[in-house]
Image: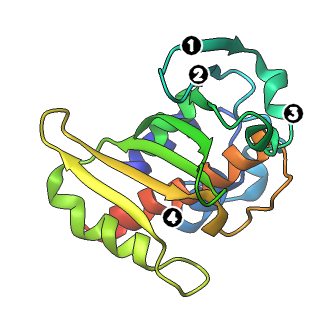
């Protein structure tokens, strides 16, 4: 899964970001740090497709350009009726189609919603990763397998993820989400 996809990136001589580069070094896919360049911070999603929608109706409010990622995440506190939908080729690497982000109306946390393209048999590995949150406390989440779609629907609070800071830029918040999901993909791969 992950090993094969990163192997393809290396074969294409693509720039790797921190997570992929460290994984490639750890697994021996990359022998020397100087073999391939590391891409800069916050550039992963500059080519992404971004929509902002209305939470109540799910109607499109606007298609946004990459500069939208430079807004502070507190944008969602000022626009509580909106959610953000982000598609990127990078999600494919971790088995995800797209990731949505919004503010929870009741608790004021940043909610992350996505679907993971993994078979039902990987449920225990996914649940195990979610219970091993870096701060030592199990992360509150909503995980359910959708047999019609063949994907795991996962919702969790971004506030509980290591590296999150209130006020960070939206692009950086998506980097934190990606890093967490990369860890999940690696965990599932190592616990097959």
Q: Residue at x 52, y 85 (%)?
A: 137
Q: Residue at x 42, y 56 (%)?
A: 185
Q: Is residue 119 left or right of residue 181?
A: left
Instruction: Please tell me whether mark 2 or mark 3 is closer to you in this view.
Output: 2
The residues tagged by marks 4 and 2 sit, at their Cα atoms, a distance apart of 40 Å
The residues tagged by marks 1 and 3 sit, at their Cα atoms, a distance apart of 20 Å
- Image location of residue 89, percent across then percent down: 54, 27
Circle nearer the N terminus (1, 3):
1
Q: Secondary structure at mark 1?
A: strand
Q: Which disc number belongs to residue 70?
A: 3
Circle nearer the N terminus (4, 1):
4
Q: Residue at x 36, y 59 (%)?
A: 142
Residue carrying label 4? 27
- Image location of residue 12, percent across then percent down: 57, 28
- Image location of residue 26, percent across then percent down: 57, 67
Residue carrying label 1? 60
Q: Are marks 1 and 2 in contact (CB under 8 Å)?
A: yes
Q: Which disc number belongs to residue 53?
A: 2
Q: Are marks 4 and 1 in contact (CB under 8 Å)?
A: no
- In this view, the residue in front, 53 or 169, is 53
Q: Residues within 10 Å of mark 1 (few under 14, many from 20)?
A: some
Residue 132 vs 7, above or below: the answer is: below
Q: Residues within 10 Å of mark 4 (few under 14, many from 20)?
A: few
The residues tagged by marks 2 and 3 sit, at their Cα atoms, a distance apart of 18 Å
Circle nearer the N terminus (2, 3):
2
- Image location of residue 126, percent across then percent down: 33, 64
Circle nearer the N terminus (1, 2):
2
Q: Are marks 2 and 3 in contact (CB under 8 Å)?
A: no
Circle nearer the N terminus (4, 2):
4
């Amino acid at each position: 899964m992950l090993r094969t996809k990163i192997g393809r990136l290396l074969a294409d001589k693509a720039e790797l970001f921190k997570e992929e580069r460290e994984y490639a070094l750890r697994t021996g896919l990359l022998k020397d740090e100087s073999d391939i360049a590391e891409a800069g911070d916050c550039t992963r999603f500059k080519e992404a497709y971004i929509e902002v929608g209305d939470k109540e109706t799910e109607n499109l409010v606007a298609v946004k350009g990459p500069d939208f990622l430079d807004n502070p995440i507190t944008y969602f506190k000022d626009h509580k009726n909106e959610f953000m939908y982000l598609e990127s080729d990078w999600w494919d690497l971790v088995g995800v189609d797209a990731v949505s982000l919004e503010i929870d109306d009741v608790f004021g946390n940043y909610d992350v919603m996505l679907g993971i393209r993994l078979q039902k048999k990987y449920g225990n590995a996914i649940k195990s990763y979610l219970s091993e949150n870096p701060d030592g406390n199990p992360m509150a989440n909503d995980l359910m397998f959708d047999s019609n779609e063949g994907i795991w629907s996962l919702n969790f609070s971004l506030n509980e993820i290591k590296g999150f800071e209130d006020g960070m830029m939206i692009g950086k918040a998506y980097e934190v989400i990606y890093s967490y999901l990369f860890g999940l993909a690696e965990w599932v791969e190592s616990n097959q």
